[in-house]
Image: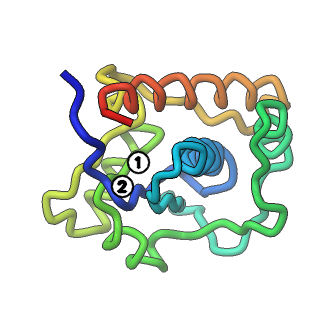
Amino acid sequence: MKTIFPYHHILIVCSVNTARSRIAEGFLKDFFLKLGLHVDITSGGIASNARDGMLISMDAKLAMEEVGIKLSENALSYDLKKHPELFEMADLILTLTHQHKTEIDAFFNTNNKEILTIKEFAGEHGDIDDPSMKELEGFRSARDEIIDYLMKGLNKYEL
């Protein structure tokens, strides 16, 4: 039996917030917009090399344009360690890897927030690998995997 979608603000976390998390953010924003549902979607990076102000990967933008989703031309990365308010506002945190969950636990007081990898959200296990240095085909593969697992997770709800 499906349940009503209980989340109002989703934070997507990856390493540096220039590729995978932006792909997931773009997909979810488009998904909820098309349904006419107001769910805030944000993203950020948690790794030690995350920085504010990095440009979003051109390959991530191109891969998303291929499925009809345009990522913002002027979007810049967020280092979550400098923006704890993004973490505090979220009622669901989705990470790309188990390592990202570990890094969140080390940096934030999680206050029993729901923190899942995208594959755990879908009821499965594992990580979604970083497509960096794998050219556009690697980003397409990551995009398809992200969308597939997000849809599996979303299908558990009445939407």
Residue drawn at (66%, 66%) of the image: 77
Quote the CA–CA distance across marks 1 and 2. Answer: 5 Å
Q: Is residue 149 above or below residue 35?
A: above
Amino acid type at image mark 2:
Glu
Q: Is residue 94 above or below residue 147?
A: below
Q: Which residue is mark 2?
A: 103
**Residue 21 in the image: x percent, y percent?**
57, 48
**Residue 90 in the image: x percent, y percent?**
34, 64
64 displayed left or right of 30:
right
SS class of the residue under badge 1?
helix
The number of discs equals 2
- The C terminus lies in which quarter of the figure? top left
155 displayed left or right of 20:
left
Of residues 66 and 109, the one drawn nearer to the viewer in this rendering: 66
**Residue 101 in the image: x percent, y percent?**
33, 48
Label 1 packing within 10 angstroms: few (<14), some (14-19), many (20+): many
Of residues 83 and 106, the one drawn nearer to the viewer in this rendering: 83
Q: Which residue is mark 1?
A: 100
Amino acid type at image mark 1:
His
91 displayed left or right of 72:
left
Instruction: State if disc 2 and disc 1 touch (CB < 8 Å).
Output: yes
